[in-house]
Image (cartoon, rainbow, N blue to C red):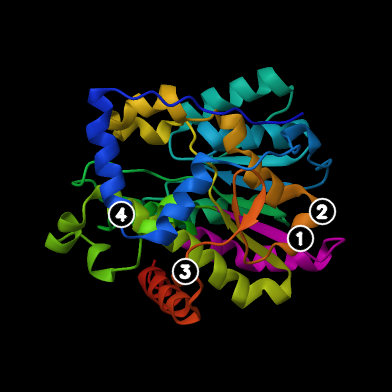
């Protein structure tokens, strides 16, 4: 089965303003344009969720598993007999997702309370998981926020997007690292996987540490560029995790899921016209991370970046700077040292 449809693009006077603004943002940035073209023209694939291997005996966490791409990822894993922890902030929304997944798969996902925008919650979540499980085979760092109101910060005072998408996931992964490493040692292939959901939007980003806490520089940057910065951070983190722990069996990847219609767009009402014109469904959006997190051949993808659909590509060159990775890792460690 080929999972591909060509989105229809319709133009109107109302749309032209938004299109012009978007072109203005990427004008003069060849690498960014290339990443946007990959998004608009995804590669065909025969891979589908029903082609992932049997996951019996595997323990998996999916952050943001209650909605969108995360829920579809949980669904596919349950069908293939994985033990899946659905990590989410809101218990009622999580239970709604668990009920839906039970109805469609006949399997039960397990709720793990996790608020990535609150470092104490992140620590409590990891401790709860560690008290229940003796292994972790796949960690999907899938959850995130996209262009929320500029006033919104994390519980610890960080920019909501960077604090959730990057810092929260770093801390969660760091706390689970000992279990990931021991699980790799006992795994038949000597590997475990950490799959980090980024975006083609990373190509517009860079790391400016003056903007990750509230202040005039952050507000000047604006929500869209703050989002791109967080997605840039996702790729840099994934690469640095690979550099540090790839030789010990941790397969760390990052990916762009595609232009997908998900709840992430709830804060992007001015872009809502795109939803009916260009966006793919969440089943497509889950393909890259399901591939990276499950198929045998993906154990060789450590440090790689995937684009739609299941194609190994390259993030922008600046994400691959070892000094950038070291600096980010050190900064992240400093933020969570006293939590």
Q: Mark 1, residues whose alpha carbon is within 10 Å: few (<14), some, or many (≥20)?
A: many
Label 2: few (<14), some (14–19) or many (≥20) C-alpha neighbours in 10 Å = few
Label 1 – label 2 distance at C-alpha:
6 Å
For marks 1 and 3, give the one nearer the viewer: 3
Provide the residue designation for mark 4.
Answer: 27
Instruction: Look at 20% across and 59% down and name the residue there.
Output: 218
Q: Nearer the viewer, residue 263 or 338?
A: 263
Q: Which residue does the numbered mark 1 point to in the structure image? A: 299
Question: Can you tell which quarter of the image residue 162 is in?
Answer: bottom left
**Circle 4 Cα neighbour tier, 10 Å, few/some/many (<14 / 14–19 / ≥20):** few
Query: Which quadrant would the C terminus be assigned to in this image?
Result: bottom left
Residue identifier under label 2? 296
Which mark is first along the chain, 2 or 3? 2
Q: Tell me what residue is drawn at x 68 percent, y 19 percent.
A: 104
**Residue mark closest to the camera, 4 vs 1:** 4
Q: Nearer the viewer, residue 317 or 16?
A: 16
Instruction: Name which residue lies at 29% across and 57% down.
Output: 156
> Which circle's residue, 4 or 3, is located before the other in the chain?
4
Q: Residue 160 location in percent, x, y? A: 30, 51
Say above or below: 224 vs 4: below
Residue 227 picture location, percent across and down: 34, 51
Q: Are marks 2 and 4 in contact (CB under 8 Å)?
A: no
Q: Which residues are magenta?
A: 170-196
Measured in 3D between alpha carbons, the distance from the residue under mark 4 to the one under mark 3, in whole angstroms, is 20 Å
Does residue 190 show up magenta in the picture? yes
| Residue 140 locus on image (x, y percent) | 60, 50
Look at the numbered disc 1 and give the secondary structure of its residue: helix
């Amino acid at each position: 089965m080929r999972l591909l449809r060509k989105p229809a693009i319709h133009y109107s006077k109302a749309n032209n303003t938004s299109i012009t603004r978007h072109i203005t943002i990427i004008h003069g940035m060849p690498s960014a344009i290339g990443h946007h073209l990959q998004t608009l023209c995804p590669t065909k694939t025969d891979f589908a969720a029903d082609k992932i291997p049997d996951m019996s005996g595997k323990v998996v966490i999916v952050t943001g598993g209650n909605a969108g791409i995360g829920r579809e990822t949980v669904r596919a894993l349950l069908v293939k007999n994985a033990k899946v922890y659905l990590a989410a902030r809101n218990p009622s929304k999580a239970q709604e997702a668990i009920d839906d997944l039970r109805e469609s798969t006949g399997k039960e996902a397990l709720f793990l309370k996790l608020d990535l925008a609150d470092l104490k919650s992140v620590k409590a979540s990891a401790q709860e998981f560690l008290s229940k499980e003796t292994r972790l085979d796949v960690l999907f760092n899938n959850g995130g926020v996209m262009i929320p109101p500029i006033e919104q910060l994390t519980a610890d005072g960080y920019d909501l997007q960077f604090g959730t998408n990057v810092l929260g996931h770093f801390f969660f992964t760091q706390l689970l690292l000992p279990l990931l490493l021991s699980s790799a040692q006992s795994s038949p292939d000597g590997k475990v996987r950490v799959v980090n959901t980024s975006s083609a939007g990373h190509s517009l980003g860079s790391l400016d540490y003056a903007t990750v806490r509230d202040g005039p520089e952050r507000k000047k940057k604006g929500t869209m560029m703050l989002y791109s910065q967080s997605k840039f951070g996702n790729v840099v983190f994934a690469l640095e995790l690979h550099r540090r722990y790839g030789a010990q069996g941790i397969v760390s990847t990052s990916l762009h899921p595609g232009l997908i219609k998900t709840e992430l767009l709830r804060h992007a009402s001015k872009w809502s016209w795109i939803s009916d014109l260009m966006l793919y469904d969440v089943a497509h959006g889950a393909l890259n991370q399901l591939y990276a997190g499950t198929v045998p051949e993906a154990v060789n993808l450590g440090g790689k970046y995937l684009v739609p659909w299941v194609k190994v590509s390259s993030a922008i060159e600046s994400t691959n700077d070892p000094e950038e990775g070291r600096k980010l890792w050190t900064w992240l460690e400093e933020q969570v040292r006293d939590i």
